[in-house]
Image (cartoon, rainbow, N blue to C red):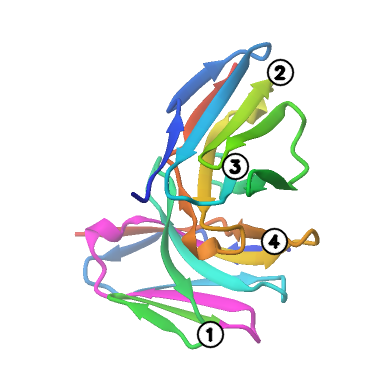
Amino acid sequence: DTEVTQTPKHLVMGMTNKKSLKCEQHMGHRAMYWYKQKAKKPPELMFVYSYEKLSINESVPSRFSPECPNSSLLNLHLHALQPEDSALYLCASSQEAGRPETQYFGPGTRLLVL
Amino acid sequence: RKEVEQDPGPFNVPEGATVAFNCTYSNSASQSFFWYRQDCRKEPKLLMSVYSSGNEDGRFTAQLNRASQYISLLIRDSKLSDSATYLCVVNCVTEGGGNKLTFGTGTQLKVEL
């Protein structure tokens, strides 16, 4: 099973809402990632979790709050977002953080902030 | 200068053509290199890793020149299904010791009948 799943597929939220994006993998991978991708732009790394600990935060605003409850799950909590945060949010996982060649992406959550 | 640079295209080629994509990277400490493929409104998928000795996977050949900080992808006998955006990806170790993938802006390929 080489699958990373993400829910929801689409999300529309207002600037005062609080919502969460969810990501799950059952490949036994110990590194999980959040990326943000704007239209016609490449994915940009936001956060890396390695063995359930946050190892990289690419200076992401605090309105994005990641959480890794266990080795299979990764959440991204959203609060007080801005319209410019509208994007495709991609989750990925890899066997370990030092094994990028084993990285798989989920299908993404397409977020629209109104 | 961008960390990873690619010609955005689009490259419009007829079926059966050979097409080559180039990529340059700025960080000489980069450790590993990849080509990803991304279809419209889909997630990126790993196409192949790139090694200094060059490597081939069917119709796809990847080359790395560390001295010139240059990566290439050659697609032979293009198929309609090869139409996608091809992302050049570079892996670096961060100051904190973690690994970070940096993606190029991608090159769009359209294979036509």
Q: Which residue is mark 3?
A: A34
Looking at the rendered image, the disc whose residue lies closer to the viewer, 2 or 3, is 3
Amino acid at circle 3: Trp
- Please check whether the numbered discs 1 and 3 fall on a single chain: no
The total of numbered circles placed on residues is: 4
The answer as to whether the residues below labels 2 and 1 share one chain is no
Mark 4 neighbour density, 10 Å: few (under 14) some (14–19) many (20 or more): few
Q: Which residues are magenta?
A: B65-88
Crowd rating for badge 1 (residues with CA inside 10 Å; few <14, some 14–19, many 20+): few
Look at the numbered disc 1 and give the secondary structure of its residue: loop
The reply to whether dot 3 and dot 4 touch (C-beta < 8 Å) is no
Q: Secondary structure at mark 3?
A: strand
- How much space separates mark 3 and mark 4, taking CA atoms? 21 Å
Disc 4 to disc 2, how far (Cα)?
30 Å
Do callouts 1 and 4 mark residues in contact (Cβ within 8 Å)?
A: no
Specify whether A6 is left or right of B31.
left
Question: x and y percent of residue B89 in the render?
Answer: 55, 63
Q: Which mark is residue A92?
A: none
Labels 3 and 4 positioned on one and the same chain: no
Q: Which residue is mark 1?
A: B52
B67 part of magenta stretch: yes
Q: Who's the residue at 52% across and 30% down the image?
A: A22
Labelled disc at residue A80: 2
Tell me where residue A4 sits by quadrant: top left
